[in-house]
Structures are given as structure tokens and as C-alpha cells.
Image (tube, rainbow, N blue to C red):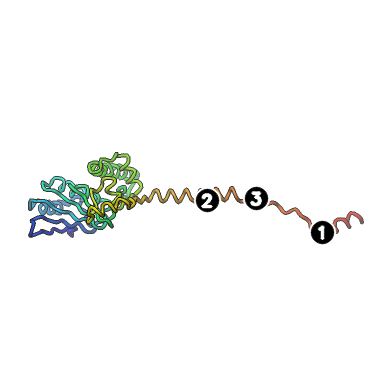
């Protein structure tokens, strides 16, 4: 499997940096005993605090879960920094940070897990049950970090929620915004915390279409049948009567 991570050691401080850039495990990590062992060996090779930079659209949820567990088990402090996007499975890894920091231009995206299945009814039902269990496991990591109610976390995942740095901090997914000094923190207080919900946008569009249709029905005037008869036609009928 091609490695999706890279270690960088700071020779001055002795601290290490782990870079997760791109898809987490483009090939399946599930059932692979070698790649997780390599990651663990590299993680545990040295002591000291580490910084994890994340710019990932997500990927293999099982790989992300094992990385999360390894980072949570690590003895030193783990600082997670999201400089681009942390989406899907990558958000699980981010939750392992002792401190999670987000770039002011970064995005944090959570949604329900998905998979591809081919088979009969029982196999489909098994896949649904598996996805439900995976979702509950992901919520466990979110709940531990944010202390938000599980119902709220589930709703955020159902809606496919995109958060800017301020919203991620507000909800507890992140602890601070990168590069912001005290003056900038005060300035950021006026910046709107943005949460984009695909479900909310879809529902809003449907509501607008319904409202527009209802407004059209209410304002549209029924077309009255034109029962008028021309003067020539009346004269013709009168002549028939007279003669």
C-alpha cells in the first residue's frame, strides 16, 4: 500500500510532525496487518510531542479509526492542525488531538458513512446494520471531544455539515483558530460562524418551490368561457326567425 502519511523531525526541538495529506488509505486498510503495524512502529519510534497536519477529504473509516486509537494511546501531547480540509474519516483522526487548531480558511466536514454493496436482501440489511454501527462509533469520537449530545451529532451527520473554523470551534470540534493573535481573535468575534447543511439547503429549495406553487394557485384567475356572439351572427339568427 502506498503510504498516505509522512513524518518530519524538527532537529532543533526534537518534536515530530506527521503530515496526512490526501485520501486516507486509497487501498483497503481493512484486513491489512502490515500497513497499520508500519504506522504504529513509526509513531512509537520516538518520544515527545507531535503535531499532526491534516488536509484530507477522508477515506477508509477503519484506517482512520486505528490511527485515532494509536494517537489517543500516544504518551506525548498531540496537536492537530487542519490547514485545508478535514472531511469524513479524516475528522475522526482530528478528534485525537489534545488540541485541535484550524486554519481560518480551513473546512471541517462531517456526514454519514457510506459503502457500496452488491447482493440480496439479507446482504443489504447487513450493510445497513454495519453502517449504523460505524456511525455510532464515529459519534463516540465526536462526543468525547465536543461533549455535544449524540442526537445533535447524529443530526449534523445526517445533514452533511460543512463548518468554517469559527463554527468548528463554537461546536467544540476545534479548540482555536490558527495564526490568530489576541487582536485578531477579537476581530474574529464579528465573523459569522458558518454551517452549510446540504439537507437544509435542499429542504429550503423544496419549501420555496412549494410556496411559489401555492402563490401561483392563489393568484391565478380562472379563465372564463367566452360566450359572446358577434353582431353578424345575431342578425343571421334574427333573419331566420323572421322568415
Comes first in the chain, label 2 or label 1: 2
* Residue 28 tag number: none
Image coordinates of residue 212 in percent, x first then y, are 52, 51
**Does the rendering let one see residue 108?**
no
Q: Could you tell me which quadrant the C terminus lies in?
A: bottom right
- The residue tagged with tag 1: helix, strand or loop? helix
Q: Nearer the viewer, mark 2 or mark 1?
A: 2
- The residue tagged with tag 2: helix, strand or loop? helix
* Residue 231 tag number: 1
Q: CA distance from mark 1 to mark 3?
A: 27 Å
Q: Which residue is mark 3?
A: 222
Tell me if label 2 and label 1 are in contact, CB under 8 Å. no
Rendered residue at 15%/49% (across/down): 78
Comes first in the chain, label 3 or label 2: 2
Residue 202 shown left or right of residue 100 in the figure? right
Along the viewing direction, whichever of 157 and 30 lies nearer the viewer: 157
Rendered residue at 26%/52% (across/down): 185
Q: CA distance from mark 3 to mark 2?
A: 18 Å
Image coordinates of residue 139 in percent, x first then y, are 27, 43
Q: Which residue is mark 2?
A: 212
Tell me if label 3 and label 2 are in contact, CB under 8 Å. no
Q: Residues within 10 Å of mark 1 (few under 14, many from 20)?
A: few
Residue 112 shown left or right of residue 101 in the figure? right
Image coordinates of residue 177 in percent, x first then y, are 24, 52
**Does the rendering let one see residue 164?**
yes
Image coordinates of residue 17 in percent, x first then y, are 14, 56
Rendered residue at 18%/60% (across/down): 2
Comes first in the chain, label 1 or label 3: 3
Amino acid at each position: 500500500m502506498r503510504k498516505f502519511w509522512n513524518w518530519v523531525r524538527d532537529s532543533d526541538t526534537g518534536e515530530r510532525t506527521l503530515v496526512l495529506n490526501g485520501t486516507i488509505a486509497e487501498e483497503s486498510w481493512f484486513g491489512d496487518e502490515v500497513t497499520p503495524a508500519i504506522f504504529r512502529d513509526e509513531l512509537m519510534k520516538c518520544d515527545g510531542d507531535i503535531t499532526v497536519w491534516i488536509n484530507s477529504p477522508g477515506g477508509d473509516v477503519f484506517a482512520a479509526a486505528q490511527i485515532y486509537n494509536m494517537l489517543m494511546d500516544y504518551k506525548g501531547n498531540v496537536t492537530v492542525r487542519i490547514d485545508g480540509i478535514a472531511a469524513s474519516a479524516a475528522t475522526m483522526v482530528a478528534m485525537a488531538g489534545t488540541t485541535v487548531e484550524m486554519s481560518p480558511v480551513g473546512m471541517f466536514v462531517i456526514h454519514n458513512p457510506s459503502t457500496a454493496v452488491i447482493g440480496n436482501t439479507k446482504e443489504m440489511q447487513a450493510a445497513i446494520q454495519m453502517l449504523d454501527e460505524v456511525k455510532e462509533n464515529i459519534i463516540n469520537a465526536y462526543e468525547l471531544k465536543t461533549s455535544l449530545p449524540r442526537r445533535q451529532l447524529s443530526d449534523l451527520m445526517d445533514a452533511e455539515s460543512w463548518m468554517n473554523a469559527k463554527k468548528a470551534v463554537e461546536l467544540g470540534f476545534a479548540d482555536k483558530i490558527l495564526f490568530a493573535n489576541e487582536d485578531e481573535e477579537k476581530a474574529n468575534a464579528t465573523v459569522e460562524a458558518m454551517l452549510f447543511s446540504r439537507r437544509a439547503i435542499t429542504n429550503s429549495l423544496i419549501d420555496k418551490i412549494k410556496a411559489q406553487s401555492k402563490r401561483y394557485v392563489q393568484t391565478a384567475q380562472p379563465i372564463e368561457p367566452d360566450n359572446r356572439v358577434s353582431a353578424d351572427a345575431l342578425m343571421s339568427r334574427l333573419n331566420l326567425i323572421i322568415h
